[in-house]
Image (cartoon, rainbow, N blue to C red):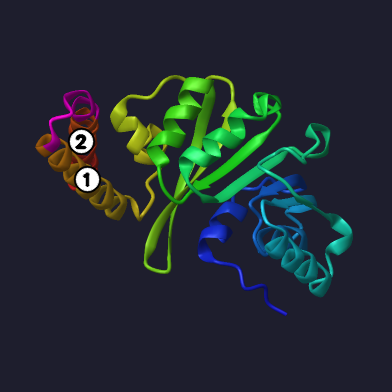
Amino acid sequence: MKIPISQRLLCCAAQVPVGARVADIGCDHGYLGIYLLQNGLATRVTASDLREKPLEKARENARRFGVAAFMEFAVADGLAAVAPETVDTIVVAGMGGDNIAAILDAAPWVRDPRYTLILQPQTSGNDLRRYLGEAGFAIEAERLVRDGGFLYFTILARFGGGRPLTPGEQYLSPQLLHSGDPLLGAYFDRVLAALARTVAGISAGGDFEKLSYYQRALDEVREMRNQYDSSNHP
């Protein structure tokens, strides 16, 4: 029986170290954890969600796919139900980047290089990257994936060695810029269009402090695009 797992979750799964003990935060129907266990990528999964209804579905799916003995379930906010010694890999996907940042910030124990963080924001990716840099987390890699007509990115991060990112880097990290990802051109198009719309909107409203941040981000990403185009089309 095939697990109905999405391309964006498969992108997260591809970055999980083999044999990991995984916390899947915001697990929804549990497909990521089930896939990791069935494919030998995880030895144990702690699955949590804010709502009981999807968590009950996750329990049911774990039984149906034969991995219930290797999964634990909790109705909880963020990492509140996760014991630090029981996991080494934390996946947070399917929510806003600001929410992911808040979840990490509420669990000081994740500021330890033993934990691998795999983060996939649906929105506010710049807020998440900003938080990671300011909190000392280093982005080790980023991957892009297209799913259902949308373009998602997944961040692999670890505590230690991080630095504050510039406005442009908060929209497109150096790791993603140099990744050689085949979807990078499409990602540039999306980010540049969104930043241009934001700058135009703020310019009309007259909020010059905000405008300074977004204009700088736009200028930096345009320069990155020029570098990218030059290196790929000399």
Q: Looking at numbered disc 2 in the image, what kind of residue is underneath it?
A: Leu
Q: Looking at numbered disc 1 in the image, what kind of residue is underneath it?
A: Leu
In terms of sequence position, does the residue under pointer 1 or pointer 2 come before the other?
1
Q: Which mark is residue 192?
A: 1
Q: Is residue 33 above or below residue 79?
A: below
Q: Which mark is residue 218?
A: 2
Question: Looking at the picture, how far across and down is residue 42, in whole percent?
Answer: 76, 52
- SS for tag 2? helix
Q: How many marks?
A: 2
- SS for tag 1? helix
Residues at marks 1 and 2 touching, judged by CB atoms closer than 8 Å: yes
Q: Compare residues 55 and 150 and report the one nearer the observer.
A: 55
The crowd level at tag 1 (other Cα within 10 Å; few <14, some 14-19, many 20+) is some
Question: Looking at the picture, how far across and down is residue 155, in whole percent?
Answer: 50, 42
Residue that sits furthest to the right in the current view: 69
- On the question of residue 30 being in view, the answer is no
**In the shown orientation, is residue 143 left or right of residue 103?**
left
Q: Compare residues 85 and 97 and report the one nearer the observer.
A: 97
Find out whether residue 115 is within the magenta segment: no
Main SS of residues in magenta:
helix
Q: Quadrant of residue 78?
A: top right
Q: Which residues are magenta?
A: 205-213
Find out whether residue 211 is within the magenta segment: yes
The residue that appears at 72% across and 51% down in the rendered structure is 48
